[in-house]
Image (tube, helix red, strand yellow):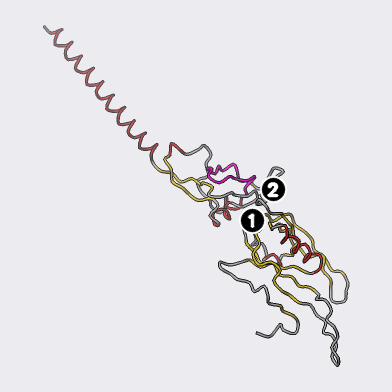
Amino acid sequence: MGRRVMAVLAAMVVGLIGVAMVLLYASGADARAVADQRPQTVYVAQELVPSGTTAADAVAKGLMVPTKIAAKGVPAGALTTVDAATGRLVALSDIAAGSFVVASRFGTTPTGSKAIQVPDGQVAVSVAFTDPARVSTFLTPGSRIVIYDTYQPAAAAPVAGKSAVAGKETRVLLDDVLVIAVGSTSLTPTASPNGQAQAPAAGALVTVALAPATATRLVQGIQTGTVYAGLRGTDAKADLGQIVSDSTLFTK
């Protein structure tokens, strides 16, 4: 009789232990399931992120945005934060729209033979701007700029009793131009008032995308005048007909 009671008690203990283990496993599975579903923030490319674009600029321009997804769906190495350190890194190659952004896609130097993406039907033209003429260092791929041209106008026919007025004129050459790359540093020669050459001024090559006919106008302006860029603000409108000369500089 005692042995039977002991066997029953042992069976009950084993059963209780089994129930406890099942409950513990179920509780752990629930915790793991909750952890897998807990949302985490990753970056997703909304638009093409061109090679050479800094992570900070890509976020500021909306090229890539933070998105919350379930933890179990986060790709290995996904970019989860853009801070002071990661914001300075540049895209090592183009990042396609719609893709998860992996941290390893950013580094210090872009790689690969393809450095720019030229929109269909357009051509890329590079302009050597001095630092002031390219709005210091604020131009980045995706910027929209106005290009001004300062040139020597054709000599007007002499008027009786008056001498021809010599002087340069400035007007808007192109009012809305897309920057697709800011290239390596360039040195632009400058001249002093007495005609003696001075030390070259620091600058950079800014590459823009234009329709072929418009590109021809820009090339002509580069060859015959001095071009200067202005960074466009939202809804900025340039007066294509305005001409500023020495005689009209201080008129309204």
Q: How many marks?
A: 2
Q: Which residue type carries mark 1?
A: Pro
In-front residue for pair 41/241: 241
Q: Which residue is mark 1?
A: 141
Quarter holding residue 101: top right
Q: Which residues are magenta?
A: 89-106
Quarter holding residue 113: top right
Q: Which residue is found at the position 80% from the left and 76% from the top?
A: 153
Looking at the rendering, in which quadrant would you find the N terminus? top left
Determine if the magenta segment contains residue 105.
Answer: yes
In the image, is residue 111 above or below residue 222?
above
Quarter holding residue 226: bottom right
In the image, is residue 68 above or below residue 10?
below
The answer to which of marks 1 and 2 sits earlier in the sequence is: 2
Q: Secondary structure at mark 1?
A: loop
Looking at the rendering, in which quadrant would you find the C terminus? bottom right
How far apart are the alpha carbons under marks 1 and 2? Answer: 11 Å
Residue 78 coordinates in the image, percent (x, y): 52, 41
Within 10 angstroms of label 1, few (less than 14), some, or many (20 or more) residues?
many
In the image, is residue 245 above or below residue 84?
below
In-front residue for pair 41/10: 41
Q: Which residue type carries mark 2?
A: Ala
Q: Which residue is mark 2?
A: 115
Determine if the magenta segment contains residue 145.
Answer: no
Classify residue 190 as left or right of residue 213. Answer: right
Pointer 1 and pointer 2: residues touching (CB < 8 Å)? Answer: no
Q: Secondary structure at mark 2?
A: loop
Residue 88 coordinates in the image, percent (x, y): 60, 53
Most distant residue in the bottom direction: 161
